Image (spheres, rainbow, N blue to C red):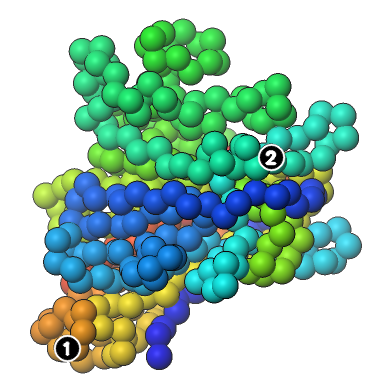
Amino acid sequence: MKNTLPVLVMCFISIGTFAQNCPHPSASIDLDVNNVRAKILNGGDLWWDPISTINTYEVPIGSSKNAIFCGSIWIGGYDASNQLLMAAQTYRQGGKNDFWAGPISVDTGSGASSITPATCNFYDNLYPMTKAEVNTFVNFGIASSGIINWPGNGNVSAGQLPYLAPFFDANNDGIYNHTSGDYPYFNLSGNYPVNQTTGLTECNDYLFGDKSIWWVFNDIGNIKTETNSGPIGLEIRAQAFAYSSTNPAINNTTFYKYQIINRSSGSLFQTHLGAWVDVDLGNFTDDYVGCDVGRDLGYVYNGDLDDNGTGGYGVNPPACGLDFCKDHSRIQMMESTIITMDLLMSWVRIVLCHRLCITIM
């Protein structure tokens, strides 16, 4: 029997909207800059192909050995009428789905949240970018197609928010245009500002890693068939990234950053958000899962010293851990604005611990 590893964190967010008629998201791309090949999808789930049901969290890269089957973020809470609302994803059995591609529009008069099928189709995409591409552009003026077509702005006339993917605004006009010197916002200096009130690094408006993949999705694009919940009104900007490093721990780790924005007029109370992960460490028939509460860490390991059988890692098999990366695990009250959730997946022979983090903007 397969093992699933849920890791949940308490937080607050907001709500209120109605479902549209968007198609299922279909885009995928591999994050493959270090010793991990991780398949990234734009529909809330990760690390697998939902059509072939073949997993791709391959470590070491090129080995045909996989540490995870699939995973997704889960979000849920109660509205003002004490109605439970959820947005989650598992295996998409029979086409079940809770997430769709694209940013949400809000009517300035009524406050109603919506998204059109055309918008869902347009953003049925993933936007990869490397730090090397940006350095080449900054130093030599050579723009890759990714830089030229970077989705820096939303369609304000359609009720979308003015900013989407992070970009450096060379002339401070608020409009992404690479011919004006704008570029996807890797912080090339490495110096990040610190919030004077919280003492935390302000890093929500940057890309990270040596390679980053950015995308945007929502929970209102159609009728939810995974949870059968009503829509919440979530616009989620996601970033998967990794570093190519001589440090084995970093070279075997991938990171995931979720900026979760309330685009509705209501509030969601007692909200839980976290990660659901089906871990298949090589041969999944002899896996065990556990957690280290003090380190906010969930992990999977082999039941013995030989991960034999189909897809197994063999003798001295590795372990795989899931952790959050900031310290705000419970928020008592929040009625709107933005939550960012940072995750990392670490594949190492001894599970490394990285501190928990969720920040509020």
Q: Is residue 252 above or below residue 233?
A: below
Give the left or right position of residue 243, taking residue 227 as reference: left
Q: Nearer the viewer, residue 215 or 251?
A: 215
Instruction: Locate residue 63: give its quadrant.
Output: bottom left
Tag shown at residue 308:
1
Q: Is residue 338 visible?
A: no
Q: Is residue 83 visible?
A: yes
Instruction: Locate residue 336: give its quadrant.
Output: top right
Q: Is residue 165 above or below residue 212?
A: above
Q: What residue would you read off at disc 2? A: 116
Tag shown at residue 267:
none
The residue at 83%/36% (across/down) is 111
Rendered location of residue 23, percent (x, y): 60, 51
Disc 1 marks a residue whose amino acid type is Asn
N-term-proximal mark, 2 vs 1: 2
Q: Residues within 10 Å of mark 2 (few under 14, many from 20)?
A: some
Disc 2 marks a residue whose amino acid type is Thr
Circle 2: element type: loop
Q: Is residue 196 above or below residue 46?
A: above
Rendered location of residue 224, percent (x, y): 68, 62
Q: Is residue 149 above or below residue 198?
A: above
